[in-house]
Image (tube, grey):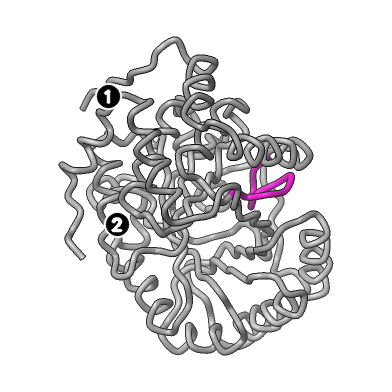
Amino acid sequence: MNKITSEQIKNLFTLPLNELIFKAREIHKKNFEDGDVQLASLISIKTGSCPEDCKYCPQSAHYNVNLKKENLIDVSEVKEAAKLAKKNGANRFCMGAAWKKLRDGKDIDAVIEMIKEVKSLDLEACVTLGSITKDQAERLKDAGLDAYNHNIDTSPDYYKKIITTRTFDERLETIQNARQAGISVCSGGIIGMGESWNDRAEMLRVLANLEPQPESVPINALVPVEGTPLQNQKIVEPEEMIIMIATARIIMPKSRIRLSAGRKYLSSETQMLCLLSGANSIFYGDSLLTTKNNDMQRDKELIKQFKQINKSNSKELINKYLIIFTDKIASTVNY
């Protein structure tokens, strides 16, 4: 596979918005069926008191945030949440723990039981638990784990301004440990933390050049939380999210591109354009790990509309949504 360069990615960023969306849509249609949207439900199995200092995260013990801290929840709670998620239409169930790393002993044993319960319901199981070793990855795989989430967050350079308690290379090592154990990789990043478009290009370059590319790529928009160092960051502009989704689809054609955190700030028109640009996975449910998510019923209506659009003239409808979304058809990105 030829390496993707930052220059190639930045060239995509500067395309007129409609041209970028059409290009992404053509690539998407070659690799996925129309209307195929993965619904992933997310639960926090251990909340708060994390020793990491990620500046965006309300779960960090370093910041004074209005967050109810909870120890590792019981397996029975996970089972009930997974049952509800499946009843509501989810096909992937994700479990997140606010840990720097997964510990051997009772923690990993409990997580293994949770994975088995989720798999018994015929749901895909995904976890995000901080760093894991090769041996731990193999144990999780043996339990039936489908996917491991470990985001790279941002570019290697900007990363140092956001996190000091874990190196960028350590993140890549955990991704490699999961991959070598035969677990699918879920890895993406966050925009809106004060990074430049160059940083965004670098983040996508790293993801696109993983071998193989991640099966899932979550694109998150920062949700500024009071008490964190990034509490005063501006909300990401809708157009920026569309550009990131479309570009990710073009350079990672076979990955599921997940429209993730920050979606609650996006209008229905913006979300529809993200779906038309190649997003084919969303977090589905009323809450994420620590922040509110979109209303579930509205999501059902959005996906229903999206599936109907796919039976029509998509080019005409993209232009229609673009006109509703903005007065501009072209986008200019300044570096």
Magenta stretch, main secondary structure, is loop
Q: Quadrant of residue 89?
A: bottom right
Q: Which residues are magenta?
A: 282-293
Res. 234 visible in picture: no
Q: Is residue 254 above or below residue 27?
A: below
Q: Residue at x 33, y 18 (%)?
A: 330
Frontmost residue, 47 versus 329:
329
Which residue in the protein does label 2 denote? 208
* Amino acid type of the residue that numbered disc 2 sits on in the rendered structure: Ala
Residue at image mark 1: 333
- Magenta segment: does it hold 286? yes
- Is the residue marked by circle 2 packed among few (<14), some (14-19), or many (20+) residues within 10 Å? many
Q: Which residue does the image show at 51% across and 50% down from the upper left? A: 258
Instruction: Give the image location of residue 306, x and y in percent.
Output: 63, 38
Q: Position of residue 63 (x, y in %)?
A: 52, 46
Q: Is residue 160 magenta?
A: no
Q: Position of residue 120 (x, y in %)?
A: 75, 80
Q: Tell which of 39 and 198 is nearer to you.
A: 39
